[in-house]
Amino acid sequence: MAVHKKFNRNVKTNALGRGLDALISTEAVSTQGSSTINEIALDQIEANPNQPRREFDPAALEELANSIKELGLVQPITLRQISENRFQIIAGERRWRASQMAGLKAIPAYIRTANDENVMEMALVENLQREDLNAIEIALAYEQLLDKSGMTQEKVSERVGKSRAAIANYLRLLKLPAQVQMALQKKEIDMGHARALLSLSSPSLQLKLFKEIQKNGYSVRKVEEICQSLNNGEDILTAKKKITAKSKLPEEFNVLKQKLSQFFDTKVQMTCSPNGKGRISIPFSNEEDLEHIMNVLDQLK
């Protein structure tokens, strides 16, 4: 085995700029049970094929790479040795990629002995704690843990620190049509939309409503109401009309809304329920707009 440069992991650095904390957590580093920290050549490191994260934000990677160019890699990644001079990432693929972009030849790393189940588990836990995995990535990672380890959902919940119900909800997302899953992965819809669609038993109906969500930009609340109507036996067109009629303001309220918008010189928002309760909101885009609104209100005194 090649000799690698060792680091003293008790030594702390004070060379951190203020902006770095926004990119890298510099609090207590999890060593994943490792006993040594070595400098490992980047070309001896490979990604974990079971990495839960499937996509990396190019802009965020470039920002991290620029910080690494200036300060070096502050937080070591965690590896396991898979053969002579070959290492696989357990946690820290984002830092590894950014280090390559920064032109580094070697980076500090904790070396850990771990089997495939532990690698998957540690990669999942590390990513859940440190990075913004999308819902489908999380669901696929949970499914992989269950399939490869033979653990129950209850056991997985104990390992990753999430409730059994939360894990079950993520796994249910994988039952949605592929188009819906891809939209969720791209964050074109959110978990609330997906959960509402899961209340429909028909995949074709799920797809029809999904296309309506894309077309009309429905809120989660509206999708939930449409799903409730569909489950009561109504078709999509009837459900849409019903929801639209329910949310439509009476004419006298529309007149009042227009007058308030003119008065405050901004687009006033107004909602009203069938029983007459509602809300008026006065938006502003900057401090100047807010000052104008306050001056208008002062004149009413």
Image (cartoon, rainbow, N blue to C red):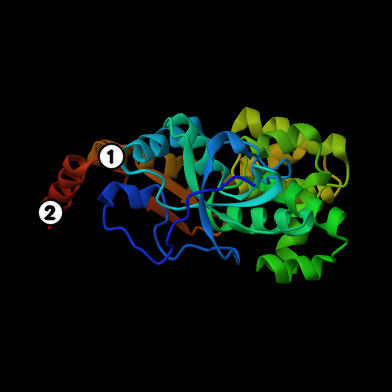
Q: Which residue is mark 1?
A: 285
Q: Residue at x 53, y 40 (%)?
A: 96
Among numbered discs 1 and 2, the one appearing first in the sequence: 1
User: Looking at the image, is mark 1 or mark 2 nearer the viewer?
Assistant: 1
Q: Which residue is mark 2?
A: 298
- Residue 264 occupies which quadrant of the picture? top left
Quarter holding the C terminus? Answer: bottom left
Q: How many marks?
A: 2
Q: Residues within 10 Å of mark 1 (few under 14, many from 20)?
A: few
Q: Residue at x 59, y 44 (%)?
A: 219
Q: Which amino acid type corresponds to the residue marked 2 in the rendered image? A: Asp
Q: Residue 164 at what x, y percent from top left?
A: 75, 68
Residue 6 in the image: above or below residue 64: below
- Relative to the observer, which residue lies in front, 296 or 166? 166
Q: Residue 110 at what x, y percent from top left?
A: 55, 56
Residue 154 in the image: above or below residue 237: below
Left or right relative to 45: residue 13: left
The answer to whether one can see residue 92 in this image is: yes
The answer to whether one can see residue 237 in this image is: no
Residue at the top extreme, as displayed: 215
